[in-house]
Image (spheres, rainbow, N blue to C red):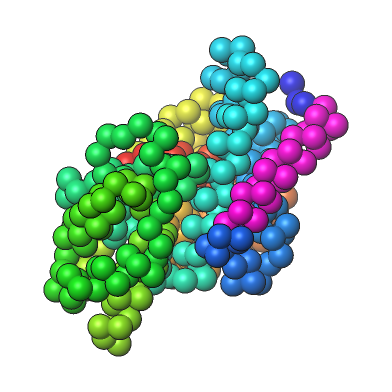
Amino acid sequence: MCPRREHVTRLVELCFRMARVYLRRRAVAGRLNPDFFGLTLDDLALDCIAELFERDEDGRFPHLVTYYEPILAKHPSRARLLGATRRLVFSKVSEGLYRRYREADPSLAKLIRNLRYAIRTGDVGVEDRIRGHLWVTFGRHDPDVYSRPVMSEEYLQVRLSACVDASTSLKDVVKAVRQVVLENGVYAPGYPMVGLASVMRRIYDLMSDDPLPKETSLDSLYRQDLHKLLYASRTLVERDMRPKYVGAKLTSSTFDAYIRAAEDALCAEFVEPGADDASHFDVLRPYLHSMSYEDFRANHRGRFQYVVKKMRADFVEKARENL
């Protein structure tokens, strides 16, 4: 059953207000400049939450259904439901900002993913979300300690510059950050990931003409992990969607083409960036050789895009949990 239009409109307005407040706070704190993306604050807020309100071919909102179903099953109070909505919006805004930074500033995105890999494999900290932001945290602490001030990027840069050079591994960088932020108990026991990546890039810029350390093997391992997660998402989506689609709506061979092409599209988008300029028609056509563009628009586009959305949503969730 599809929700009534007025209810959807009210939820869109609520999520938009939450996203706008969240972005405005970042802007006031000097941690966001919407002009960097060529957008107003309102446009950026809408862009970040737009995916939540994408419909499937049955007119439902799959992102919202997946998120709210287990929450509503517990009959939450209005306050708890509002808190859950706030967490959803903040998470989508953070994800949207990272996506836009990745597109507009690939060097920062590369540092972020390398830092995350170093944290996950180096036993030097824990990746966590604090008030919707991705952080590296150090040790187990009461949540209230994160109300302490965050060490300024300028001061952290001064402290790290004294102990970091071009040969320092990112694991050792994170160890140094841990020592600096924990040394007197004044600051929050962790650091926002984007802020730490920004500090490291400025340090590397000062050391050489190359803004990034040489992490070739690290990048290779990270891509291997992404390939594994993407294959797991492909397997899950194929298993869940095949009974519904094959026979009633598609032939088995056409469905297989959708699955392979969707994996190719997401590999180009996330795993091998720089190769993602192809349209969905261009990605699907090698698997359906006789398909014309008119045929694609009339008979394939909606269903194929839905397969891509399902696979992307599962892959992003897996990446968020594991990388």
- Between 217 and 97, the residue placed more toward the observer is 97
Give residue 284's position: percent from left, percent from top: 53, 55
In the rendered view of the protein, which quadrant contains the N terminus?
top right
- Percent across and percent down for residue 101 are 50, 64
Would you place residue 231 above or below residue 39 in this image? above
Residue shown at 73% from the left, 38% from the top: 14
Q: Looking at the image, which is closer to me, 178 or 227? A: 178
Task: Judge left or right: residue 76 versus residue 200.
Answer: right
**Residue at 64 percent of width and 41 percent of height:** 52
Q: Residue furthest right?
A: 6
Q: In the rendered picture of this protein, how many numbered marks are placed on residues?
A: 0
Residue lying furthest left in this view?
Answer: 167
Q: Is residue 211 magenta?
A: no
Image x and y of residue 281, in percent:
59, 59
The answer to whether residue 266 is seen in the rendering is yes
Q: Is residue 54 left or right of residue 309?
A: right
Asked whether the viewer can see residue 258, the reply is no
Q: Is residue 54 left or right of residue 66?
A: right
Q: Nearer the viewer, residue 228 or 258?
A: 228
Q: Which residues are magenta?
A: 4-26
Please report the residue visible at 25 percent of the width from the left and 39 percent of the height from the top. Answer: 139
- Majority secondary structure in the magenta region: helix
Image position of 202 with respect to 230: above or below = below
Q: Residue at x 42, y 46 (%)?
A: 148
| Residue 34 occupies quadrant | bottom right
Q: Quadrant of residue 42?
A: bottom right
Residue 115: name its quadrant.
bottom left
Q: Is residue 311 left or right of residue 163?
A: right
